[in-house]
Amino acid sequence: MSTRPGAATAETGGFYSRCEWCRTITAALGKLAYSLLVLLIVAAVAFVGLRLAPGDVTTQLLDPTRATPAELEALRRELGLDLPVAVQFWNYMTGLLSGDFGKSLLTREPVSAIVLNAGAYTVALAVTAFVLTFALAIPLGILAASRQGSMLDRIIGLCCGLLIAIPNFVLAILLINLLALWAGWLPVAGSGTWKHLVLPALALASDPLGFATRLVRISYLEQAAMPYVDALRIRGVAETMIRWRHIMRNALLPVISLAAVQVRTLVGYTLIVEVIFRWPGLGKRLVDSILTRDYAVAQGLTVLLALVVVLSTLMSSLLYRWADPRVRSS
Amino acid sequence: MSAGIEKTGPGAQIARRIVTTVPKPVLLMVLTFFIGGLAGGALLLVPEWSRLVFRQSLMRAYSAPLENGTLLGADQLGRALEWRLLAGLAISLGTAALVTAIATTLGIVMGLLGGFFGRTADRIVTLVIDATWAYPTLLLAVVVAGIQGPGVSTVVWALGLTLWAAMARIVRAQVLVLREQDFVLAARALGYGKLYIAIRHLVPNLVPIWILMATLFVALTIVAEAGLSFIGIGAQSPTPSLGKTLAEGFSFASSSSWPLLLASLVIVGLVTSLNSLGDHLRDILDPKGRVPAFRTPRMRAIMQREQAAAAPAASPTVLAEEVSVSIRREPGEDVPVLTGLSLALGSERALGIVGESGSGKSVAARALIGLLPAGLVLSGGRVSWQGGGIAELDAETLRGQRGRFIALVFQDARASMDPLYTIGDQITEALQAHLPQDAASARKAAREILARVGLDDPSHFDRYPHQLSGGQMQRAALAAVLVLRPRVLIADEPTTGLDVTTQKKIVALVRDLRREMGMAVIWISHDLDLVTEIADDIMVMYAGQVVETGAVSDVLRAPSHPYTKGLIASRPSRDIAPKSLLPAIAGNVPEPGKWPISCRFLPRCGNAVAACSAGQPLLEGGTDRRVRCFNPVTPVREIPA
């Protein structure tokens, strides 16, 4: 075991791998272009969708019974609503490309400023939940799979079932009552210290953790039953090598795809969890903007959050390509 | 269900399997919630009854269960919780039914459109799916709430318009598989329109997916509806949705925690029972998701229970004594697949094992190497390598011997390699596992063996398994075991999937390598001709038993067992697929568990006498030639030595 056999390929790639790099870059560019197309549709849907909302936005800002028509007209011009819809859409899209997500109708605050303020909170929360999910799911899933049928496996399975079945807002309530109100260890809601982050991150991670642990377990068991594992045993390769070098690497491939799905799930759940814990992130701002009918903010944040989902899908497919030679050369 | 025995439509079949397989408590829970939902629906729709749901009474506000004439207590406005929860159940399930109807219908239509109606349609459908997927469900719900205001219908539209994408992806993938199937190709050849085929032939095959996704969507909708109502986007007061009851319970928890507790319990109970139903349905309907529920204990553990017999004086390289293997489904319910296999392989000898599929040849190979596939157990007998029983060896010694002393190549060479590592890497790995050395010399040895098996292009070393052809892959698999120069090579139908020219090349290669390395070889095949090209001795197997053994020339010249004779008569059958019938012998090898108690070949034998149905013949004869038959074609004892 003095050298890792995997090192054998590194220096001998030569012609073959250089060609592979060309293919990788071409594929990455193709995927990027496709993602941009998806984003274009997403942005267009958000634009059209929120135009379908009842009433002109100006009537929500100024009371139409008291404001003069001149005032309404001035506001219209200021917001760019006097222009033809096509021009509005063009301005909106070119604005998006230069990072201008619009302005709040109520406070006139640029959406990009909201994103900078609130985004940090959401990133902190979502990244914590994401790391928590996979840092726990991978070892737990493998542990359960390698002790298949044991008491430990059953307990982990039961916990996953519970994590999936208990909706995260119910879990949030439970955690608030237990750890904040009863034990008094953690604050009920709000932000400021790391302690404020614990409960929302736990509530956010619960459901993804249950799914991811199950997937890792099933994927590991599936790979452990593959013929190549028997073939490796028959060639006399050591069990530790078989487990860590072969089964694990194959079993973690689906986790790459799952990670992108989980980013999508987390983005959706932040809306609920941030509201419950009054966490001043993008999700709470988005719900607030809908409830106060601040459509410009709603539209900007919606596109931004969809962008996060599209980018994570893109990254996961590139990562998958890198990890699986079968996809790489097809 | 009793009447459904004659009806064998996919729906009836699936329904029967669901009722018999899903545990009764799960079905009962789901049914209870469903009936509760119906009752709640009636409660909301009949005006006189709906008053029960909305009637406020400040006198009984915050009542605990069974207080003030209530069953489950009352909320902050004194509305009876039992009625509100029932009505909430109806709203949740009704929402779920609508969402599921929208999402599954859209999903099936879009999936069919993408999978069956041409490339342009597919591109558009995929783009729409991906764009939809970019909106997390809850995000879209919030946007829809922005358009049409909060409410239950917001939830319906938001979920219906996002969840279909998940369904459409799965349907599309399934349709891509289905459209290549015989019945679809046949229907197209007959000139039926695509729409007709889609509705008539594809949609019925999507029923299992529909059931699975519907269960999933119902559970998802209930959670999402409750969550959205909880944050104020979904149902609004005084609509008694479960999420609204929960949210109000949360707000007034300091006065009474009963509403919060009961609403949580209903939601969690409902979702848990639906998820549990979904898990069981997945086991029934999705063959891929099923993981073997039970894993065979290591062979060594079982073999340890076998008593150790003394090693024979003259020790052949590989010795099997009365080895039996069974499928173990439930403990005590073993089905034998191999019975009483005895063989002795001398060093540098070549033994051919022939027989049709299902005769137990591959199981014999796996038993000889001491590593049975999952689900099979050694139910008797003993295997020895170089005079020592392998049951007595510890795991590490056994590992050291496998690959170095005895090696096995599979029929499916590609499946025997990890898809994520290059050929060179895996050969090097096998070498390093036994003979640790520096990377450069290991690579050199790997390149040499690759060149020796005919993969002499240097780039083969860095290829991945999927980049090689079937013949190249079989050579690579041979290289991966031959790099260790094993004393015994077992080849389990290593040429079956290959074309005739490649088959011959592989056989010639193994014959040369055998001479070069002084290996003993066991060559397993259904093809008698290939075996005769390489083997000194031959062993004919039928239904888990050896029926005839002897030197190749003797057996071919004068077959003794009627089955052997039939195999020889079928010889110009090289291009017949392995599973097809042998022209000279009618019928099939009986499956394990269905072997006759008489001679196992009796049902197909043209040479049977009265004694054959009375009991099983023994494998009899001298050391050179044995046959298991009451009425042999050529009596063994009369064969001149």
Image (cartoon, coloured by chain):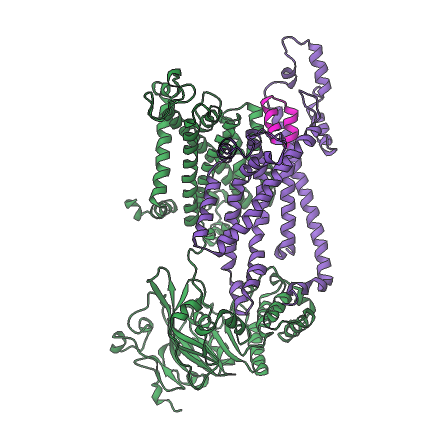
Task: Look at the picture and state if B567 lies above or below A182.
Answer: below
Spot occupied by residue B304 in the image (x, y as percentages of width and height): 41, 70
Q: Furthest-right residue in view? A: A98
In the rendered picture, chain A carries what hue?
purple
Q: Quadrant of the N terminus of chain B?
A: top left
> Total label count?
0
Residue at coordinates 52% horizontally, 55% vertically from top-left?
A: A220
| Dominant SS type (magenta) | helix
Let me know if residue B183 appears in the view.
no
Residue at coordinates 52% horizontally, 40% vertically from top-left?
A: A206
- Asked which quadrant contains residue A93, the reply is top right
Seen in the image, is B366 located left or right of residue A247?
left
User: Any idea which chain is the green one in this picture?
Assistant: B
User: Is A284 within the magenta?
Assistant: yes
Q: What stretch is highlighted in magenta?
A: A283-302
Q: In which quarter of the image is the C terminus of chain B?
A: bottom left
Seen in the image, is B117 located left or right of residue B604?
right
Spot occupied by residue A99 in the image (x, y as percentages of width and height): 73, 33
Spot occupied by residue A275 in the image (x, y as percentages of width and height): 56, 29
Let me know if residue B558 appears in the view.
yes
Task: Look at the picture and state if B194 lies above or below B485.
Answer: above
Residue at coordinates 65% horizontally, 13% vertically from top-left?
A: A62
Task: Look at the picture and state if B608 lies above or below B464.
Answer: below
